[in-house]
Amino acid sequence: MSPTRPSVTAVRQLSPYEQLAARYDALLGDRAFARLGRAYARIERHYGLAFRSAADVGCGTGTFVAQLRARGIHPVWGVDRSPHMLARALAKNRGNGARFLLQDLRTLRLPHQVDLLTCQFDTLNYLLRPPELHTALRAFARALPPGGHTVFDMIVRTGPGAAPLRRVRVERRGPQGTAYETHVQRAYRTEEITAALTGSGFHLRGAHPVPEGHPALRLVFVARKADTAVSPRSGRSPSPSWSPRSAPRPPSTPAPNGPSTH
């Protein structure tokens, strides 16, 4: 009798959200959006944000895009670098007039400026170096007219011993082996974020914690694009107000609900 050969299990590494996209809403998105969506609604009322057009950068499966279109906001752009997440967003927003772009937020180029730019679910934490955060926020500023607003949330570092990087492995096993994707994020200090905003031509209006139920601190930042441009030599704009509260090529214009690559 011949000895039994050990089985060999295939292991494949996937790109972020390649397999998670199909389960994202059920596992995370729907529950997290309910909580974060309430925070965004309170902020919109508190600051009296008025906007006719919007872009949601890192739109994921398109839940917030759908909500904006249901309110009659037009146009609304959804932007994400994951084709797997965009496929879900397209399906969720089919026929509602939303438009989608396949882009990296560091090289964001909208066909035209919008009044409001959002970036949710700690998307900016995927930028692992401060210069990348500066690059992304400068791209945000270019997408807004003077006086336009950006509203985004980030996980922030709160203690001197807090690790800047966190790594999460999402794994799925099946009869044909194991597939996994790795997500790496950097938690920034609030001073780093405010400096990046100021250097990108934004005036910080406030930052608000979102209850999370775990030690990580998530803040929603509200910033207004300055009326005057940032000096290219000094890199400075008017000083921000810090208010923690308890409460690339230009893309071709895609058809409605159609993705565009750049």
Image: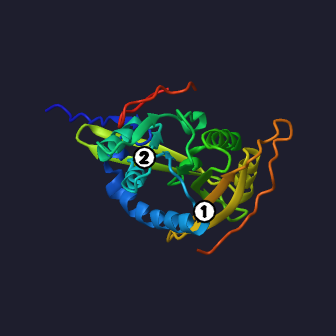
Q: Nearer the viewer, residue 40 or 105?
A: 40
Toward the left, the furthest residue is 1
Picture colour scheme: rainbow
**Cα distance, mark 2 to mark 1?**
19 Å
Instruction: State the image coordinates of residue 160 (x, y, percent, origin top left).
Output: 73, 63
Toward the bottom, the furthest residue is 246
Q: Nearer the viewer, residue 98 or 37?
A: 98
170 is higher (above) or lower (below) than 214: above
- Please tell me which of labels 2 and 1 falls first in the chain: 2
Q: Is residue 18 visible?
A: no
Instruction: State the image coordinates of residue 147 (x, y, percent, origin top left).
Output: 67, 51
- At label 2, the amino acid type is Gly
Query: In the visual, does 153 lie left or right of 30?
Result: right
Mark seen at residue 60? 2
Q: Residue at x 80, y 48 (%)?
A: 237
Mark 1 neighbour class, 10 Å CA radius: few under 14, some 14 to 19, many 20 or more: many
> Disc 1 marks which residue?
219
Q: Quadrant of the N terminus?
A: top left
- At label 1, the amino acid type is Leu
Q: Residue at x 69, y 42 (%)?
A: 134
Instruction: State the image coordinates of residue 78 (x, y, percent, origin top left).
Output: 45, 43
Q: Is residue 247 visible?
A: yes
Instruction: State the image coordinates of residue 222 (x, y, percent, origin top left).
Output: 63, 58
* Secondary structure state at the residue bearing disc 2: loop
Q: Residue at x 32, y 57 (%)?
A: 26
Mark 2 neighbour class, 10 Å CA radius: few under 14, some 14 to 19, many 20 or more: many
